Image: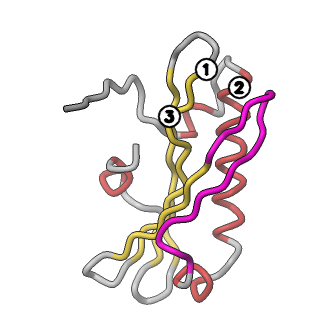
Amino acid sequence: MTFRIAIGGCRCADGITSRNPLVRELCSRLAGRLERLRSLGPEMLAKLPTVLSDRERIDNRVVRFNTYRDKHESGDALIVVRLPTYIGSAGVGYMYAEGILLKADSRVTEPDEQLLWFYR
């Protein structure tokens, strides 16, 4: 059995304003990935794999970013970019996830926080 205690919303909007430069950089990279996804257009977003994982080097560490496409019964697809738990130098873990919602009618919107909670 596992559990987690979250302090904060695990939103990059919170991380961008952090006093910690590493957290700001992590969120900046995550936000950049999300913006690149937004620029793809609905047809390309619908064709994304269900899970995509890749790595970047930040401050002499390798950080893994995961992208998920989760199709809902409504026909909508939640697309999430997530930084799995990243343990900083003080032993504090950081987890951030942001996403977009591809509606069944091909509109791209912001998802409700409830939809993102599973990934945070």
* Circle 1/circle 3 CB separation < 8 Å: no
* Circle 1/circle 2 CB separation < 8 Å: yes
Q: Give the range drawn in magenta.
A: 48-64
Q: Residue at x 43, y 89 (%)?
A: 105
Q: Position of residue 15 (x, y in %)?
A: 59, 31
From the viewer's perspective, tell me whether residue 100 is left or right of residue 8: right
**Of the residues shown, which amino acid type is indicated by label 2?**
Leu
| Residue to which mark 2 is pinned | 22
Q: Which residue is drawn at 50% across and 34% down?
A: 85
From the viewer's perspective, tell me whether residue 66 is left or right of residue 20: left
Q: Position of residue 103 (x, y in %)?
A: 42, 80
Count of numbered labels shown in the rendering: 3
Membership of 53 in magenta stretch: yes
User: In this orientation, which residue lies closer to the viewer: 104 or 67?
Assistant: 67
Q: Position of residue 3 (x, y in %)?
A: 25, 29
- SS for tag 3? strand
Which numbered disc flags the more N-terminal residue, 2 or 3?
Answer: 2
Q: Residue at x 78, y 39 (%)?
A: 57
**Of the residues shown, which amino acid type is indicated by label 3?**
Thr
Around disc 1, counting alpha carbons within 10 Å, would you say few (fewer than 14), some (14 to 19), or many (20 or more)?
few
Which residue is most to the top? 90
Q: Where is residue 93 in the image (x, y as percent from the top left)?
A: 50, 24
**Of the residues shown, which amino acid type is indicated by label 1?**
Gly
- SS for tag 2? helix
User: In this orientation, which residue lies closer to the viewer: 97 or 58?
Assistant: 58
| Residue to which mark 3 is pinned | 85
Question: Based on the displayed image, in which of its 4 quarters is residue 83 positioned?
Answer: top right
| Residue to which mark 1 is pinned | 88
Q: Distance between the residues labelled 2 and 3?
A: 13 Å
Membership of 39 in magenta stretch: no
